[in-house]
Amino acid sequence: MSVIRKMYSTKNKTVEQPDPLALDALFAEFYDRLVYFSLQLVRDQAQAQDIAQDAFIKYWQEREFILANKGAVKNYLYTTVRNASLNIIRHSKVVDAYWQQQGTSEPEEELTIMEAIISSEVMAEIHSAIEALPENYRQISILSYLEGKKNQEIADELGMSINTVKKQKHRALELLRLTLSPELYGLLFALAIGRVV
């Protein structure tokens, strides 16, 4: 019996156990970005979520063959999501009908893919900055800038005056200006101008 215990304990020492914390950290950092990236291509939220989840599964299965740095993992995840999203597009009936009418050219244009990646990274930065705001500013910012609600809708939902909503939105923008780069702040400000009512 002690020989079996010894064999079992030796075997467990040599087998490398997966580090779920590393996968959890990667998932927390990149999942929303990857879903947003895929959503821009496939235009279906459920498919985009499935594609992003599958990318993490595929990464985990092939992690031994990928350089152990965040940049390589990020590139791998984006490439996997892009390829899976394009496969979905290629197999959809709408795209098949389009290809029959247009010929055999590929829908994949590097500029379009790159724009989608940049857009998802920009939105992730804006989300991160909004999440770092104090609770009352964060809540109003999410409802306004991310969900597109008007000031009156926010006031009604939160049970506060419209003037309070306007003041807190203004203060939130001031705080975001301090944390975001000028380019990202300009984009967020453009969103704010578009939804001032």
Image (cartoon, rainbow, N blue to C red):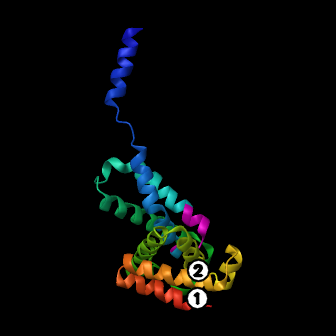
* Between 165 and 190, the one nearer to me in the picture: 165
Q: CA distance from mark 1 to mark 2?
A: 7 Å
Q: Amino acid at mark 2?
A: Ser
| Occupied quadrant, residue 122 | bottom left
Which badge, 1 or 2, is on the more N-terminal residue? 2
Q: Amino acid at mark 1?
A: Arg
**Residue most toward the top?**
1
Q: Is residue 178 above or below residue 135?
A: below
SS type, badge 1: loop
| Occupied quadrant, residue 105 | bottom left
Q: Can you identify the residue that label 2 sits on?
A: 144
SS type, badge 2: helix
Give x and y (percent) for residue 18: 39, 41
Give x and y (percent) for residue 177: 40, 81
Tell me, yes or no, if residue 99 can be seen here.
Answer: no
* Between 43 and 161, the one nearer to me in the picture: 161
Neighbourhood count class around disc 1 (C-alpha, 10 Å): few under 14, some 14–19, many 20 upward: some
Q: Main secondary structure of the magenta part?
A: helix
| Occupied quadrant, residue 56 | bottom left
Q: From which residue to which does the magenta span run? A: 41-49
Tell me, yes or no, if residue 175 can be seen here.
Answer: yes
Label for residue 68?
A: none
Q: CB of mark 1 within 8 Å of CB of mark 2? A: yes
Residue appearing at x 52%, y 62% in the figure: 51
Quadrant location, the C terminus: bottom right
Residue appearing at x 42%, y 8% in the figure: 1
Residue appearing at x 55%, y 66% in the figure: 48
Q: Can you identify the residue that label 1 sits on?
A: 195
